[in-house]
Image (tube, rainbow, N blue to C red):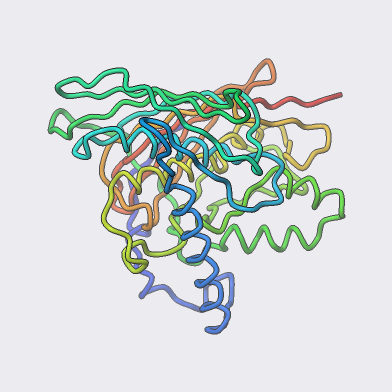
C-alpha cells in the first residue's frame, strides 16, 4: 500500500465540525440512548476480557449471549492475551502475538486457556497459550513481552483521508442493511457477524455487502472503543488497551482480500474463516480514542487471502500492525 503524508483534515476537532455536514442526523435523546447502549456493550466486552483464574496458569473465559453460531475470533485472541499478561511482570507489555484458529468456538461453552510460561529473560518474556473446549484445542498462540526501551525508530506515513467526524457509523449503516434483507440473508448475517457495538467503526469508503463491486484490495476504517474507559472508572491499564485493540483488529481485515472479487460473506456459496492472526505493537495509544485502521491485501490464492493492517493514531503515529490469512472458499 502506498502511503501519503498525513493531512491537516485529520486534526479537525469534533468541536469545529460543521454539524450541517454530518451524514447521520440524531436527536439529543437518541444520542443519549445510543451512547448508553455503546457504553453498556463496552462494559460487556470488559467483562469478557476479565478472565477467571481457576488454577495456576489456567483461566476461564466466557462468551456473552449471542445469536452467532461460533465465537468471534477477535474475542479468543484478546482473551488469550489477557491470560498471558496475567502471568507476566506488569512492567513488561505484549509487543507481538501470533495465533492459529484450529476449530470453531462454541459460544455456549466456556473456553479454558492454559498458559505455558516458556521463558522469562532479562529483556523479553515468552508465553504460549492454548484455548480449549470439551477437551479439544480450538486455538493456540505465542506471545512475546518486553520491558519498554528506547532505540532506533522509523515508520511509514499515515494515509491521507478524511477524519471520522461526519462519517456514518458502521453500526447505523449495518442496521439499515439488516432492514432491507430477506429472512435468509438475515439468518446468514447474524450467524457470521458479531455485534459492532463494543467497537465503534466508521468506514472511509464503505463496502456494499449486499451488492458488492470489484474494488482495489484496500480499505480505511476509523475505530475506537464505544465509550470512555476513564469515565467508566477503569483503572489505567496499557495491557487492557492492547487487548481491546487486538479484539478490534479482527473486524474487516479478512474482508479486504474479498474486495477485488466482488464477493461478500452474505453470498450463500461463500465460506470464510480466519486461519491465523498476528499483531505487533509499536507505540503507546488509547483504545478509546480514534485510530485509523489501514488495510490491504497483496495476494489471494488456493482459497486463502492474505491481509495486512496498520493502526495509526490521530497524530500520525503507527502504533500497531496486523497480518491475517483467511479461508475465502467459493463453492460451485
Residue 215 in the image: above or below residue 303: below
Q: Nearer the viewer, residue 3 or 176?
A: 176
Coordinates of residue 116 in the picture (x, y in percent) = 37, 22
Corner quadrant of residue 182:
bottom right
**Residue drawn where x is 43% and y is 40% of the image:** 246
Residue at 44% from the left image edge and 27% from the top image edge: 114
In the displayed structure, 179 sits above or below 209; it is below
Say if residue 306 shows up in the picture: no
Q: Residue furthest top?
A: 302
Of the pair 59 and 142, the residue shown nearer to us: 59
Q: Residue 310, how many percent across, how many down?
A: 41, 38
- Where is residue 37 drawn, in percent x and y? 55, 69
User: Taking 321 as reference, is 233 above or below it?
Assistant: below
- Is residue 298 among what the camera can see? yes
At x 18%, y 38%, the residue is 91
- Quadrant holding the C terminus: top right
Amino acid at each position: 500500500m502506498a502511503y501519503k503524508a498525513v493531512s491537516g483534515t485529520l486534526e479537525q476537532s469534533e468541536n469545529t465540525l460543521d454539524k450541517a455536514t454530518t451524514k447521520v442526523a440524531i436527536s439529543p435523546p437518541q444520542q443519549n440512548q445510543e451512547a448508553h447502549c455503546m457504553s453498556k456493550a463496552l462494559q460487556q466486552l470488559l467483562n469478557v476480557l476479565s478472565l477467571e483464574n481457576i488454577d495456576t496458569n489456567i483461566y476461564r473465559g466466557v462468551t456473552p449471549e449471542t445469536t452467532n453460531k461460533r465465537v468471534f475470533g477477535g474475542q479468543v485472541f484478546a482473551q488469550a492475551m489477557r491470560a498471558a499478561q496475567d502471568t507476566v511482570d506488569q512492567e513488561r507489555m505484549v509487543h507481538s502475538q501470533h495465533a492459529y484458529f484450529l476449530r470453531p468456538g462454541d459460544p455456549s461453552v466456556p473456553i479454558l486457556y492454559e498458559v505455558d510460561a516458556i521463558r522469562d529473560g532479562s529483556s523479553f518474556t515468552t508465553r504460549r497459550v492454548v484455548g480449549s473446549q470439551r477437551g479439544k484445542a480450538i486455538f493456540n498462540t505465542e506471545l512475546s513481552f518486553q520491558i519498554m526501551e528506547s532505540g532506533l525508530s522509523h515508520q511509514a506515513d499515515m494515509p491521507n483521508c478524511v477524519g471520522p467526524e461526519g462519517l456514518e457509523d458502521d453500526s447505523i449503516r449495518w442496521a439499515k442493511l439488516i432492514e432491507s434483507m430477506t429472512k435468509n440473508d438475515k439468518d446468514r448475517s447474524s450467524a457470521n457477524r458479531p455485534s459492532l457495538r463494543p467497537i465503534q467503526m466508521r468506514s472511509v469508503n464503505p463496502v456494499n455487502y449486499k451488492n458488492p463491486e470489484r474494488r482495489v484490495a484496500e480499505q480505511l476504517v476509523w475505530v475506537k472503543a464505544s465509550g470512555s474507559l476513564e469515565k467508566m472508572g477503569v483503572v489505567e491499564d496499557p495491557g487492557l488497551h492492547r487487548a481491546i485493540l487486538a479484539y478490534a483488529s479482527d473486524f474487516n481485515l479478512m474482508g479486504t482480500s474479498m474486495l477485488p472479487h466482488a464477493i461478500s460473506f452474505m453470498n450463500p456459496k461463500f465460506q470464510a474463516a480466519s486461519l491465523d492472526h498476528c499483531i505487533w505493537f509499536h507505540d503507546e495509544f488509547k483504545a478509546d480514542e480514534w485510530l485509523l485502521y489501514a488495510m490491504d491485501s497483496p495476494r489471494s490464492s488456493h482459497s486463502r487471502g492474505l491481509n495486512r493492517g496498520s493502526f495509526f493514531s490521530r497524530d500520525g503515529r503507527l502504533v500497531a500492525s496486523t497480518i491475517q490469512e483467511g479461508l475465502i472458499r467459493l463453492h460451485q
